[in-house]
Structure formats: structure tokens, C-alpha cells
Image (spheres, grey):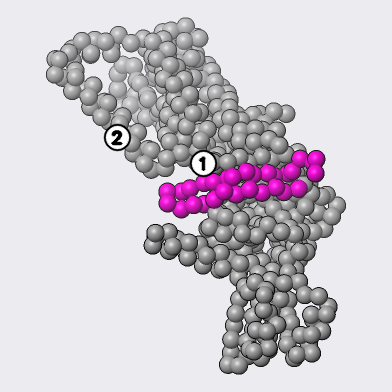
Amino acid sequence: MSRIIKVARMQLINKWTFIGIPLVILASAFLFTLAIWYLVRRGGGEGILYGGGAQAPMWYFLALGIQALTLTFPFAMAMSVSRRSFYLGTLALFSACALILAVFYYLMGLVEIATGGWGVDGRFFALQWIAENNWLTQILFYFVLMILLFMLGFFAATLYMRWRTTGVLVFTIGLGLALLGAVALITLTETWPQVGRWLAAWTAAGVTAAGAGLAVVLAGSSYLTLRKAIV
Amino acid sequence: MSETPAIATRALSKTYKDVKALDNVGLSLAPNRIYGLLGRNGAGKTTLMSILTGQNFADHGTAEIFGHAPFEHDPTLARLCFIRESQKYPDDFKVFQAFHAAALFFGNWEEELAQDLIRAFNLPVKRRIKKLSRGQLSAVGVIIGMASRADITFFDEPYLGLDAVARQIFYDRLVEDFAQHPRTIVLSSHLIDEVANLLEHVIVIDQGRIIIDAEAEELQGAAVTVTGGAQKVEEFIAGYPVIHRDALGSLSSISIRARLSEEQRDRARAQGLELTPVSLQQLVVRSTLNSQKNQEQTTERQAIK
């Protein structure tokens, strides 16, 4: 058996971390939202009800990205695993988890529409902006979003592993400066209305494509950083 | 010798900011022997082992494991096992899960031996590793190192926090298992007397430099302490390199690097001089101190220039 697959199996030794906790987060976010919706209806609330709880497990992926590296990487080194095998195995496992969860979101969206928004006209999984696309775009959208968040956490953690606090500080300050520069540029050229129109014009497919591009860049940078990281 | 060495380094150097962790280290370790890597804290032992296992990088020089550079080379890495003295484990791992992972990665993993050692060390396998005491944590590392039966196993100060009984169990089991399954073992330690009997070859590192690289047998009896009347001792040791001097009134006790013949021993006895062998620990301590003194003198001389 390849060492890459063994890395994925090692990450899964504690199944609770990878499978149990995201499911608990999703289930509780969903049940809380449902309870609130019923209360709103009882209170005479009208119109479609939207809930943003579906993103809750995705943020956990950000934390997982950090954890997979800071805690498991030094142990993987002790297991005589190359950095490359560790990287590929961990990414493969996360991709599989993200794919399963993305398909699950899509299926739950179908159920949501079929049950008339869980009987209360609520929107938890099938947010209109996403649900109006074809099935592939929907699944890819969730998948890319989860991978992107995971890669963000993973990349930040590789920076920490390689250059410790200095690396993370330099990166976040640099990122802050870049954002500030962009805001300054838009303000000084008085182009906020155009920017607003540009942002509103994004489709789910466009976000998916851009997110995938960014995730690939982060994945590449993470690998190059990790190659020379020291535990 | 045509046999590929288990470990070979050439001109290996590594500097952390202003500290020379490794300074021109050249070593060749034959397979299937037990090596002692001895030295003070911060002498460069862990850095050397990290580079040998591809976990750290040298600034200069090369390191080869069975003829291959270990860095990012899975087939070579798979033959190594190196559990750090400060090894980190995933936060959510219980003890048995760490062994489960080790069984995945180490092809020669010997579950029976692992179970046997778990019992011997009284290790609570269902406890989270985070909650273990220092000694229990060391035991986890020792068990992974032993049961992995890797072609080259590094033990990095494996006894920290272990009580005397547990340490003896470790030494005994190591020798026992080594006899049945010979492999290359590098034992890093500063408890020299405790491990002296296990070692076949001794490497002493100080301030990143190798100051002793010799067979254990050669070192045993390579130095002797001569005790007696100051005058007589001085006469007796004339011409031999002195590694240490102690004086108490008219009594003198001087350690010299010498392998005395039976005839010399008889002569010493006749003059009322007492001869005691210098233990490996004493030899290492004295060599290290002398090496540091020489280093300082060189630095001073350079400063004067």
C-alpha cells in the first residue's frame, strides 16, 4: 500500500476529528435553524426564511487545515514519511471529505425543495443563488469552497511551520497592506459604483472557478513552503 | 570494506544563527551494530539525527543512508525510525492510536513486542498522549523505536523521566531483541555509564565536532588513573598524555591515556601506586572538557592576532 494512502489512513485514525465533528456541527446548526424557523412561523413571520448555518462545517475545515499540519506533521515525520507523501495524503483525504460533504449538501438541497423548505419555506441548503445552477456547478461550488477554506488554514500553518510567528506576521501584514492598497486605489479613482456592479455580477460558476484557481495557488505555495519546513 | 555503510556523512556542517550545531562532521557507521552518540546537551546530537533522517537540512556536506540521501526519499526513509526526545503527537491521539499509526508505516512492526513492552512499562494505552507523564511519554517513544525494528533506529535520550527499573527494562530488552534481530541502533545519551555496556562503538560530539569516534573495547582500558605519592606518580606517567590531574596534599591522582603492559602494572604495584581504569563516562567528560579548553585557547589566540 502506498505511503500516501497510509497518511490518509493515519489522519483518519481518530475518526471523530474528521467525520464526527463536522457532522455534529452541521446537524446542530441545521436543527437550531429549524427550531428558529418554526418559532418565527408561530410568531406570524411571512416570506421565505434564509439560514446561513450550512457554512458552519466549512469553517471547521479552516481549523482542520491548521490542525492537520501543526499536530500531525511532526508525528508524520517521526513515522518516517516524506513531506511529499504527507502533503498528498492529507490533501487527498480532505478532497474526499469535501466531495462527500458537497454531494450531501446538494442532495439535502433537493430534499429541501421537495419538502417545500422543510414545511416552513426555509432555505438552508438550497440558497437560490446556488440552487438555480445545474447539479455539477452546485456540487463543485460547495466542494471548492471547502477546499479553499482548508487550503487557507493549511497554507497559514505551513508558514508557521517554516518561519514560525514571523512568517505568519509578515504574510498577514502583507495581505492587509494589499487590501488597503486596493481600497485606496478604488476610493481615489472614485470607481466604487463600478466595483459594486462587478461584484454583483459574479455567478456561482464564476465564484467556483475563481475559488478553484486560488485554491490551486495556495496548494502549490503550501507544498513549496512545506518542503523545507522543520519540525 | 565494500559493504555500504548504514550511515555516512562527509563534511557535514550546520549553523543556527551564531551557534555551530555541526562542524565538519565526517562519520561512517557500519550496519547491524549498536552505536552510542554521546555528548552534552546542545552538543549537536539531535541536529545530527534530524539531518540523517531527512527532517533537517545541512548547510554544507552530505549525509547518506545506505548510499542514498534521505531527504524526501520514501524508500530510504522507510528504513529509518527516529522518535525525538520532544516528539509531538496529534493532540487527539490516545496511546494505542500512536502504535496503530506506527504499525501502518513501519513494515517490520512487531506487535507482540509492542504489547510485551506496554505491559513491562505499565503504559495506560487508552489514555490520551497529552495526559501522559514525562516517563510514560518516553516509554511511548521507546516502544515505537523498538517495535518498529527499522533497519536504522535512533533513540534520542529515550530514558527521560523513566525510573531506574524502566530504564533497565529498556536496556535489557534492547540487547535481547538486538541479538535476535540485528540492526543499526544509534543511542543518543548523556547517561554514559548506564549505557556503556550496551555500546559497541562510541561517538562523542561536542560543540558540533566529533571528538571521539572509536570502538567501545578500545576505549575501555584506553585510559588509567594512577594514584599515589606525587613524586612517584609524576615519574610513572612521564611521557603519557595527561587527561586529568587531581592533587590532595602529597597525594596525586593523574589520569593518562595509556594502555599499560603487564610489566608496567607490576612496576606500579611495586612502587605502591594504585591503578584504576577510567570509566567511559570519565573519559568522555575529560575529553569534552579538554576539547573545550583547547577551543577557548584557540579562540583567545585568534583574538590576540
Q: Residue at x 17, y 13 (%)?
A: A191
Circle 1 — which element?
loop
Q: Amino acid at mark 1?
A: Asp
Residue at mark 2: chain: A
Q: Nearer the viewer, residue B50 or B21?
A: B21
Percent coordinates x, y for residue B293 in the rendering: 51, 67
x and y percentages locating residue A202 in the rendered image: 33, 11
Q: Which residue is mark 2?
A: A173
Mark 2, Cα crowd under 10 Å, few <14 / some 14-19 / many 20+, is few
From this viewpoint, is residue B149 visible?
A: no
B160 on left or right of A61? right
Is B15 one of the magenta-colored residues?
yes
Q: Secondary structure at mark 2?
A: helix
Q: Is residue A205 visible?
A: yes
Please indicate whether residue A187 sits to the left or right of residue B245 in the image: left
- Cα distance in 3D space between marks 1 and 2: 30 Å
Return the x and y of residue B233 as percentages of the image width and height: 67, 85
Foreground: A37 or B89? B89
Q: Is residue A19 left or right of B7 when viewed as pictured? A: left
Amino acid found under the numbered disc labelled 2? Ile
Q: Which residues are magenta?
A: B1-30
Q: Describe residue B134's horizontal placement relative to residue A56 as left or right.
A: right
Residue count near mark 1 (Cα–Cα under 10 Å), binned few <14, some 14–19, many ≥20: few
Q: Which mark is residue B183?
A: none
| Residue to which mark 1 is pinned | B59
Examine the image and state in which quarter residue B78 appears: top right
Q: Main secondary structure of the magenta part?
A: strand
Residue, x 83% and y 80% (percent of image)? Answer: B263
